[in-house]
Image (cartoon, rainbow, N blue to C red):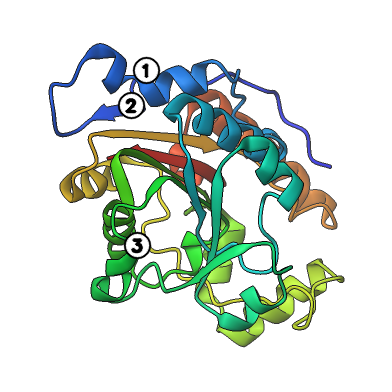
Amino acid sequence: MQTLDTVTPSLAGVVSSSRSAASDHASSLLAQTFASLNVENHYVWAWDNYKRVVQSLTARVGAKRLVEIGGGRDPLFNIDEIERLGVEMTVNDIAPGELAVLPSAYQTACFDVAGDPAALASCRGQFDLAFSRMVFEHVADGKKAWSNLYELLSPGGVALTFIPTLYSLPFVLNLLLPDRLAASVVKMVYAKRTDAEDPVFPAYYSWCFTDDRLNRMLSDIGYREILVLPFYGHHYYQSFPLVRDVGRWMMKHAQRNDWRAISSHAYVAVRK
């Protein structure tokens, strides 16, 4: 596994109160939550702690109705965990077949988060917390997805996405390669990935950035609080020693200096 120096990122400068002069507590809810989690800007921390982050946001917001966007056949929480959280959890996916394999105890909703807003009317304002992991890179129109997500949230509701980001080289290559070739490469790197068990979907990386462009777009939609936390490093070069060593050197410098143009992943958290 690739290792990098771990750095605790400052939350100053990554929080944007975009729409209102709300109280200090309201405008810093996201920052307070992440400050309590001792975030490290290493991709391994991002993967290992995502469930804990969702749980912390649930408690901080007092969320009772949650939706996992694109959870499909592999939702973040099992039924026992949902019961312990004491929440109503809906698992969403665009494909009925992905939801059909879930145990019947799960509550599901089949819709396209980037689709026609009219199709989401029955869910408008229904969720206190929406979250996703490795989903928004597969959305062709990221701005429309974030706009629809805004409509799904209750007043004061929070959304969190965990995304791969441009312009990390493996994801640039994934974007540029034809879909079938990109899928073949992924299956070569991850031998256990099959169409039957863990299919590879086309990736568009629409709005998968960590710079001010993303903040401005989210602010224009109406989110009153925006927090973008970049993470650095990945494991894609492990089989190529020279490339791996050069990549590790670059990532160390990017991590220490917060060079977001080559971050590899991010948490994007917003509050309605």
Mark identifier at residue 187: none
Residue at the spot of label 3: 123
Answer yes or no: do the residues labelled 2 and 1 have beta carbons within 8 Å? yes
Circles 2 and 3: CB atoms closer than 8 Å: no
**Distance from label 3 to label 1 (Cα)?**
34 Å
What is the distance, in whole Å, between disc 2 and disc 3 at their CAs? 28 Å
* Residue pointed to by mark 2: 15
| Amino acid residing under circle 1 | Ala
Q: Quadrant for residue 192, please give it.
A: bottom right
Task: Kindly identify the residue that appears in the image at 44 percent across and 17 percent down.
Answer: 32
Q: Name the secondary structure under disc 1.
A: loop
Q: Position of residue 142 (x, y in %)?
A: 35, 63
In front here: 41 or 258?
Answer: 41
Work out how far the residue at label 2 is from the one at label 1, CA to CA, in angstroms.
7 Å
Residue assigned mark 1: 12
Question: Does residue 78 appear in the picture of this structure?
Answer: no
Q: Nearer the viewer, mark 3 or mark 1?
A: 3
Identify residue type, mark 3.
Answer: Cys
* First along the sequence among labels 2 and 3: 2
162 vs 206, left or right, is right
* Up-down relation of residue 177 to residue 41 (above or below): below
Q: Who is closer to the viewer here, 180 or 86?
A: 86
* Left or right, residue 91 beside residue 159: right
> Which of the two labelled residues, at mark 3 and mark 1, occupies the earlier sequence position?
1
- Mark 1 neighbour class, 10 Å CA radius: few under 14, some 14 to 19, many 20 or more: few
